[in-house]
Image (tube, rainbow, N blue to C red):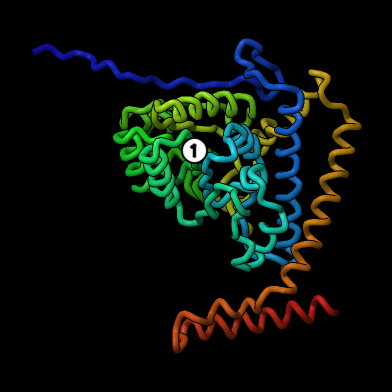
């Protein structure tokens, strides 16, 4: 028998609407009002400034380590903006922009990153899951939620975020396979920021794109410019509509870049070149979108200055609120209680070290 090419149901496209110079492809522009566009901008700017505030608080010793979002705001806002209140969102560990967009107050994230479980409480009626620190562990959970939605015949959608490193995990492949076989209403948003901590993307897979991994499971996949909030929005809108109408899951690969460290205990200068960072700084999604809004007549320099002031005041108030709440919370040493009748030696050592650390911080605060 002769060889013949197998025709696949889907193919892979790359979508870009607003390039790094702020030039717009009008034919691909999604239908968005001025109000919606300005809300996207505020969400991105709030995430950027909150990210900077968290870094300052971490360096001052007020909170523990966290994963900065700088550079990936468009990939998160463009995706999550398509969800309704009744939809579900499952973040990984870097989704500051998406979490804020969904309604979690900055004060809660401060409290959470300060080590208090109370900060991880999801606001009432908000259909979000807590941060998932283990890589890709949230993906099977997202499929489980989506399966429950389909079983109950609800018109709801599940959207989950993850990074390029997660595509090297078995959980990713199991989740996509299950989602595809059962046709669940799930949208998988991969933020390909090129680095899984210190492992570059080319050392994780030989695939030309990460989006094409969707083809192996028989579902649609698309690659988008993840620093273009309009492209992310358009691609996710199509995926969400498909999922809501019973068309099953979609994999979206957002090409983006983390402009700072993996987490605040990481030194990216040890494994990546400064020249690479400078190239991606020119593709920064925030000034790109601001330029577009200004040229469209939706935003002025005064508007930006006023918004910067408004956001600073908001974050000042949120920090004050977080401090007031933390003063009422229990001793963080309580984390060592209520599990073991007698602490193992390694936990006893950690408890003593942490106690000394707290005492030192209190002395420094009152110095």
* Residue 206 drawn at (x, y percent): 37, 34
From the top left corner, tell me how far across and down residue 222 is, in percent: 46, 25
Q: Residue furthest right?
A: 302
* In front of the other: 206 or 160: 160
Q: Quadrant of residue 246?
A: top left
Residue 188's spot in the image, x, y percent? 46, 37
Compare residues 8 and 81 and report the one nearer the observer.
81
Q: Quadrant of residue 334?
A: bottom right
What residue lies at 51% left-to-right and 46% top-to-bottom? 90
Q: Which residue is rendered at x = 65% and y = 18% of the image? A: 31
Q: Residue furthest bottom?
A: 342
309 displayed left or right of 19? right
Q: Position of residue 296 (x, y in %)?
A: 79, 18
Classify residue 345 as left or right of residue 110.
left
Is residue 44 found left or right of 175 in the rendered image?
right
Q: Which residue in the protein does label 1 denote?
A: 190
Indicate the secondary structure of the residue bearing disc 1.
Answer: strand
């Amino acid at each position: 028998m002769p060889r013949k090419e197998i025709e696949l149901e889907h193919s892979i496209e790359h979508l870009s609407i607003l390039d790094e110079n702020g030039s717009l492809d009008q034919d691909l522009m999604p239908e968005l009002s001025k109000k919606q566009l300005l809300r996207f901008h505020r969400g991105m700017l709030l995430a950027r400034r909150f990210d900077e505030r968290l870094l300052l608080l971490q360096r001052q010793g007020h909170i523990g380590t966290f994963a900065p979002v700088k550079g990936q705001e468009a990939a998160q806002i463009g995706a999550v903006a398509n969800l309704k209140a009744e939809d579900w969102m499952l973040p990984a560990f870097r989704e500051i922009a998406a979490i804020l967009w969904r309604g979690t107050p900055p004060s809660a994230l401060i409290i959470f990153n300060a080590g208090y479980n109370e900060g991880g409480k999801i606001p009432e009626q908000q259909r979000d899951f807590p941060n998932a620190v283990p890589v890709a562990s949230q993906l099977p959970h997202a499929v489980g939620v989506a399966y429950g939605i389909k079983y109950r015949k609800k018109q709801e959608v599940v959207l989950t975020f993850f990074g390029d490193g997660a595509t090297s995990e078995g959980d990713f492949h199991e989740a996509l396979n299950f989602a595809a076989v059962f046709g669940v209403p799930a949208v998988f948003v991969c933020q390909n920021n090129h680095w899984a901590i210190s492992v570059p993307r080319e050392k994780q897979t030989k695939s030309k794109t990460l989006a094409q991994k969707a083809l192996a499971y028989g579902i649609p996949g698309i690659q988008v410019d993840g620093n273009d909030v309009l492209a992310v929005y358009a691609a996710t809108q199509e995926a969400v509509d498909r999922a809501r109408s019973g068309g099953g899951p979609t994999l979206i690969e957002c090409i983006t870049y983390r402009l700072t460290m993996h987490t605040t205990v990481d030194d990216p200068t040890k494994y990546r070149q400064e020249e690479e960072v400078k190239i991606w700084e020119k593709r920064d999604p925030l000034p790109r979108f601001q330029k577009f809004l200004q040229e469209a007549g939706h935003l002025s320099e005064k508007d930006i200055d006023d918004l910067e002031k408004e956001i600073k005041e908001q974050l000042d108030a949120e920090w004050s609120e977080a401090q007031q709440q933390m003063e009422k919370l229990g001793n963080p040493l309580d984390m060592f209680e209520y599990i073991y009748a007698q602490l193992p030696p390694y936990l006893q050592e950690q408890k003593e070290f942490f106690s000394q650390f707290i005492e030192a911080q209190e002395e420094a605060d009152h110095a």
